[in-house]
Amino acid sequence: MGRLFGTDGVRGLANGLVTAELALSLAVSAAHVLTAPPGASSTRPRVVVGRDPRASGDFLEAAVVAGLASAGVDVQRLGVLPTPAVAYLTALCDADFGVMISASHNPMADNGIKFFARGGHKLQDSLEHSIEAHLGSSWHRPVGDAVGRVGDLDDARQQYRDHLRRSAPEPLTGLKVVLDCADGAASVVAPEVFTALGADVVTIHAAPNGRNINDGCGSTHLQPLREAVLRAGAVAGFAFDGDADRVLAVDAVGDYVDGDQILAILAIALDGAGQLPGRRLVSTVMSNLGFTIAMRAAGIDVVLADVGDRYVLEEMRARGITLGGEQSGHVILADYATTGDGVLTALKVAGQLVSTGKSLAELAGVVRRLPQVLVNLPGVDKSRVSTDPKLQAAVATAAAELGETGRVLLRASGTEPLVRVMVEAASRAQALAVAERIAAVVRQRLAT
């Protein structure tokens, strides 16, 4: 088996790759790696566990909880909550670590397991390597009173909801918005918070049944949100993914607003308020060149990180930067959260609509996106993306052809069995032609 951990935990087909046996083993291994050895502390380790509403979350949660308790760890179940809620409650409860059971934006049949270290931060690569290395190792099993106890944190949703309200003090009175909750983890808490702040809320896809998460809805399928915004006459719409750690938007006339534009809106607002330290933010290599150009014009420096909000956060922490994000809609506001939080981000953008009196189209219009084409290539050997000489030569030729008016990015997905080809150019036709040319080389050279 290859490395289990991708850019966002362990993820794959539930009961295929992500089995109950694996979940239990990962929980035991994490307990050994992320907690103090027996006798080193006077208190028993404590862990919080949350999940999204996928049907497979039932048995995976049971397996994770069983593994933790069998390793002598006390467990507090949080129930169905967004991933950022688990991160927040890991810190609030001073837990040794947190566990989220979710496959984020992936289809319902998938599921995953991700860990948060003490304080609610995603694990460093070295800790994930250690957890994986300890899988299947022999260990001393506690017995009697030394086994862990399991309970529920009954006010988990209320604690998170209160945190969101404190983090978004701008009243949203009368602001009509549509929320697409992807039939996922935000289905209850997002409408509750927006309504509590005075917004006129229209909610779609907020009736999870274990099977419908991300099914033609949410941040990966924006057309239903667009239709609902136009039908309701709303000023904006926000679409979350299954675990609500990301958000994308639609403006009043139905145009899509991506993560680059959302990040720009927040950066300019924070900079104007003197709350953007060093006038810097972190984005990723996937961000549109138009975003970088807009930030440069606003006097804001962009630091680039690898794709994945964990890598964005690592750059932020290393450089003392408080804002970062991805084109996909992961936005990290470090003054309020330790990870991407879709609901918090949507509240902050909605607050800007109120405080500036501008439309979402006006605010997002600061970023003029260059045409961008993304081609996903399954069924190829992604391990050879960076080493195949003819493929690298094709990329170099394309980059020289585009010059300063575009760029090429070729990368292996960290969460799916795909190779991604991204091309930006002065025209969509040129971007598409270059992307297809490189894709053909990928298929030829990396065929499995």
Image (cartoon, rainbow, N blue to C red):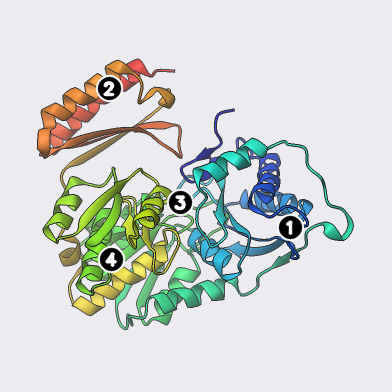
- N-terminal-most mark, 4 or 3: 3
- N-terminal-most mark, 1 or 2: 1
Instruction: Name the residue carrying label 4.
Output: 277
- Numbered disc 3: secondary structure: loop
Question: Is residue 313 toward the left or the right of residue 10 in the image?
Answer: left
- Spatial CA span between label 3 and label 2: 35 Å
Instruction: Name the residue carrying label 3.
Output: 214
Q: Residue at x 59, y 28 (%)?
A: 1
Instruction: Name the residue carrying label 2.
Output: 392
| Amino acid type, callout 4 | Pro
Determine which quarter of the picture holds residue 345: bottom left
- Numbered disc 2: secondary structure: helix
| Amino acid type, callout 2 | Gln
- Numbered disc 4: secondary structure: helix
Instruction: Name the residue carrying label 1.
Output: 40
- Spatial CA span between label 4 and label 1: 39 Å
Q: Nearer the viewer, residue 2 or 240?
A: 2
- Spatial CA span between label 3 and label 1: 44 Å
- N-terminal-most mark, 3 or 2: 3
- N-terminal-most mark, 2 or 4: 4
In the rendered view, tell whether residue 234 sits above or below residue 444: below
